[in-house]
Image (cartoon, grey):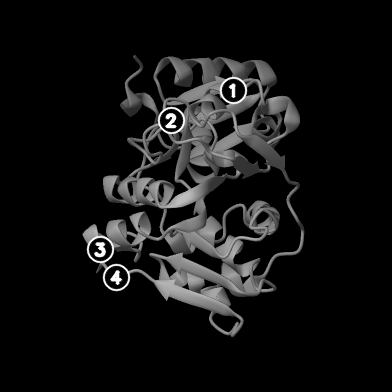
Amino acid sequence: MVDRRLYTSGSLAEQILQLLRAQRSLHINKLHALLQVPARELTAELKVLAAAGLVCLRGLNVICIDVLPEPALSVRMQLHSGEKTAIGEAAAELVGESRRVLVEGGSTSVYFCRALQAKKNLEVISCSPLSLKPLSARGSLKLRVTGGEVCAHNSNLVGPRVIEAFENADADLGVLSPAVMDPRYGPAYYEEEDALIARAICRGSRRVIVLADQSKLGQRSNYSGLAEGQHVEAMVSDMRPQDLAVFGDVLAQMGHPEVVFVKPVTRVDDELVLLDV
């Protein structure tokens, strides 16, 4: 095991970790282009970091597993916004004829709700007032916020009242946007209270879909968001079809759901990126 204290400021290892901590994962070619170092030197440094348990290599993807606190929501709203826009729009198509949808908090959830604006006769229930904010002017939608206590780290509502509201919702569709996609658990969270809410959404929904941009795939966290025996119907992601084999263990944890592949969009809703969070 390599002592992390050996990585002095400005070293190649520290530069690699800073990029991966910000982006969570990067294709090795992208990392090479950003760092402008010889490929052999980069490969050698990645092997050292992998041996230290700080990164892992999945195919040509380099994934940061040096678990850090999740960035603030205001930061996450600006990360991978093109990917999240495309994921939200594709996920909205999966709503279909659903009449009641459960949505948790998180940046991708906000993009998903934004894509629901054209829907009619739909009730959206969330533990996050921010997730529902893009829909607040849509009179054709019924919006409901669960009760609960305000969580300090992300402003979502948490606690027994949230769990009860979701478990008893009898919803057509539950939408999870987990912190990471852990190869051991599938959808996973840094905080136990967030994972408990995700499991309640699973128990209160007849169908469950997962929204996850590629940066979350292969990341590790502490708490599974799936209810016992839960089967996920679909995962919407910007991962590439050729990455299916690389992340097969993640998909296996969800019962091998259909994967809806999307391509990041170049147009991004500035209102969402700049939401006051």
User: Residue shown at 61%/41% (left/top)?
Assistant: 234
Up-down relation of residue 131 to residue 68 (above or below) = below
The residue lying toward the viewer, choosing from 53 and 193, is: 193
User: Residue shown at 34%/26% (left/top)?
Assistant: 4
Label 4 environment density (alpha carbons within 10 Å; few <14, some 14–19, many ≥20): some
Query: Where's residue 248, x and y in %?
Result: 59, 22
Question: Which amino acid type is marked by label 1?
Answer: Gly
The residue lying toward the viewer, choosing from 78 and 101, is: 101
Give the Cα separation between the discs numbered 4 and 2: 34 Å
Query: Where's residue 165, x and y in %?
Result: 33, 62
User: Mark number for residue 147?
Assistant: 4
Upstream in the sequence, badge 4 or badge 3? 4
The residue lying toward the viewer, choosing from 80 and 135, is: 135
Give the Cα separation between the discs numbered 3 and 2: 33 Å
User: Mark number for residue 161?
Assistant: 3
Q: Are marks 3 and 2 in contact (CB under 8 Å)?
A: no
Q: Are marks 4 and 2 in contact (CB under 8 Å)?
A: no
Taking the image as shown, residue 149 lies to the left or right of residue 276, namely left
Question: Which amino acid type is marked by label 4?
Answer: Gly
Label 3 environment density (alpha carbons within 10 Å; few <14, some 14–19, many ≥20): some
Give the Cα separation between the discs numbered 4 and 3: 6 Å
Residue pointed to by mark 2: 65
- State the quadrant of the C terminus: bottom left
Q: Secondary structure at mark 3?
A: helix
Q: Secondary structure at mark 2?
A: loop
User: Residue shown at 32%/35% (left/top)?
Assistant: 222
Image mark count: 4
Residue pointed to by mark 1: 248
